[in-house]
Image (cartoon, rainbow, N blue to C red):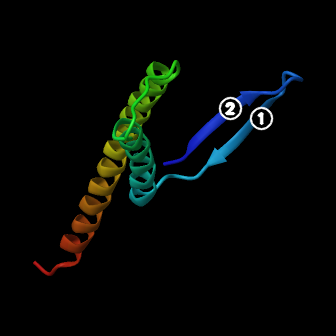
Amino acid sequence: MEIEVTRESEHKETESTRKKTLSRLELMEKATAVIALLHGRTTAKAFRARQDDAIRLQYARATIQALAAYGAILKDEELEDLRTRLDEIEARRPA
């Protein structure tokens, strides 16, 4: 699975950049970073609300939802790959 990002430059030209597929490990690293940020913020000795807390929390929620969706897609792809491999093994097995 590849994600294609398309953006318009100042000259109204369209640029296309191919991004690599994230692995499960990379997804976990990103989720861990978000969790660590939120945990550190809420467990500090002196918690003081900031003006940007609500916005940061909205982005954190959106990030976690995106990571969950991406993880589900990865899982589906891995299951499909396993099904294909199993079908190939069963096809080679003598009757």
Residue 15, numbered label: 1
Left or right: 57, with 14 as reference point: left
Residues under numbered marks 2 and 1 in contact, where contact means CB atoms less than 8 Å apart: yes
Q: Residue 24 location in percent, x, y?
A: 39, 56
Q: Which amino acid does label 2 sit on?
A: Thr
The Cα–Cα distance between marks 2 and 1, rounded to whole angstroms, is 6 Å
User: From the viewer's perspective, is residue 31 above or below residue 94?
Assistant: above
Residue 6, numbered label: 2
- The residue lying furthest to the bottom in this view is 94
Q: Residue 48 location in percent, x, y?
A: 43, 27
Q: Which amino acid does label 1 sit on?
A: Glu
Left or right: 22, with 45 as reference point: right
Q: Residue 38 location in percent, x, y?
A: 39, 38
User: From the viewer's perspective, is residue 72 above or below residue 14?
Assistant: below
Q: Which of 66 and 77 is in front in this view?
A: 66
Secondary element under disc 1, as helix, strand or loop, is strand
